[in-house]
Image: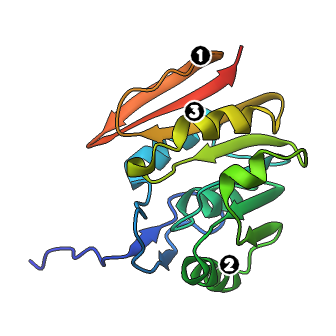
Amino acid sequence: MPSKVRQSNSVRIIGGEYRSRILHFPDATGLRPTPDRVRETLFNWLGQRLHGLVCLDAFAGSGALGFEAASRGAERVVMLERDSKVRAVLKQNAALLQTRGVDILQMDALAYMSVAGELFDVIFLDPPFDQNLLLPAVQSAATRLRVGGKIYAESPAAFTPEGFSVLRQGRAGLSHFCLLEPV
């Protein structure tokens, strides 16, 4: 019986309209897609359908979180990616999926969140682990949340920032992940 081979630099959408679609992404420093099992847990926490919600995927990378949110009916998803090569592939994947309401911007996540602007129901934060960006990202993201909004954060260690309540948390491999709400 042949073994199932996982193609490197690819991610599978696990739920919603684009379920089972495979998306490819380029090699890039710090790019580490959120695993299927973690995304499944996260979207169980958020509810399987995200109709009417506005989401920000602040460190888009492979696009796994943003495309998953779009697949599950988010009204709008803004994806931020600094790397032009990675952003170009995100745009190709959005065209392949024929997404609606997805904007992919080439921009630094901290710079974007540090200025007043659009408010979000859910903000996904999965920055490169080696750059110590999570705490400043959470602090900036809090200013861009709608009332009742949630922040999803991934980190290499358990993470409970001051001023936030941890609604749910988990661990998979080397990643700790949690759903936060400002107190």
Residue at figure coordinates x 41%, y 54% from the top left = 36
In x, y percent, where is residue 16? Answer: 63, 59
- From the top left corner, tell me how far across and down residue 12 is, in percent: 46, 68
- Amino acid type at mark 2: Ala
Please identify, in this view, whether the residue under mark 2 or under mark 3 is nearer the observer. 2
Upstream in sequence: badge 2 or badge 3: 3
In the rendered image, which residue does mark 1 sit on? Answer: 162
Vertical comparison of 117 with 160: above or below: below
Task: Name which residue type carries label 1.
Answer: Glu
Helix, strand or loop for disc 1: loop
Q: Are marks 1 and 2 in contact (CB under 8 Å)?
A: no
- Judged by depth in the image, the label closer to the viewer, 3 or 1, is 1
Q: Which residue is pictured at 30% across the width and 78% down the height?
A: 7
Looking at the picture, how far across and down is residue 110, in whole percent?
68, 50
**Disc 1 to disc 2, how far (Cα)?**
36 Å
> The residue tagged with tag 2: helix, strand or loop?
helix
Q: Nearer the viewer, residue 114 or 181?
A: 114
Q: Nearer the viewer's eye, disc 1 or disc 2?
A: 1
Image colouring: rainbow
Q: Is residue 25 visible?
A: yes
State the image coordinates of residue 183 (x, y, percent, origin top left). 71, 13
What is the tally of numbered marks visible in this picture? 3
| Mark 3 and mark 1 residues within 8 Å of each other at the beta carbon | no
Q: Taking 167 as reference, is 77 left or right?
A: right
Residue 16 seen in the figure:
no
Amino acid type of the residue tagged 3 in the rendering: Trp
Considering only vertical position in the picture, is 105 above or below 69? below
Residue that numbered label 3 is attached to: 45
